[in-house]
Amino acid sequence: MKICSEPIHSSDLLVEILLKLPSATYLKPFTDPDAKIQDLEEGLESKDWVRVFQSLNDVRVLAIYHSDLLTPSL
């Protein structure tokens, strides 16, 4: 068993938690999907990778529950 000799920082733990992709069973439909679509382009083009990750999850919700709204954007 290999043991990491470097300390684990709390920010590293946060990143690990944030990167775990939520199961689709935990995703819920948006109350205002049109507003989410408006924010998608900006979120996906962001330099902040956490925001990009959140936007990708938003795409998942839109694809599952509001796919009719995504078709024109494709």
Image (spheres, helix red, strand yellow):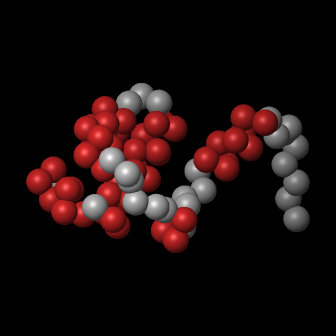
Q: Quadrant of the N terminus?
A: bottom right
Q: 15 and 61: which one is in front?
A: 61
Instruction: Point out residue 52 in the picture as x, y percentages from the top left corner.
Output: 42, 40
Tell me where residue 33 appears, x and y as whole percent.
30, 50
Residue 67's x, y, as percent?
A: 24, 63
Residue 69: x and y, percent? 20, 56
The residue at the far front in this view is 31
At 37% from the left edge and 51% from the top edge, which residue is drawn? 31
Identify whether 71 is placed above or below 73.
Answer: below
Image position of 71 with respect to 48: above or below:
below
Q: Quadrant of residue 26?
A: bottom right
Q: Splitting the image into 4 quarters, where does residue 6 fall?
A: top right
Furthest toward the top, the residue is: 47
Q: Is residue 54 above or below residue 3?
A: above
> Which residue corresponds to the image point at 78% horizontal and 36% vertical from the top-left?
10
Which residue occupies the extreme left position in the image?
72
Question: Quick one: quadrant of the C terminus?
Answer: bottom left
Asked whether, in this view, residue 61 is left or right of residue 15, the answer is left
Most foreground residue, 44 or 6: 44
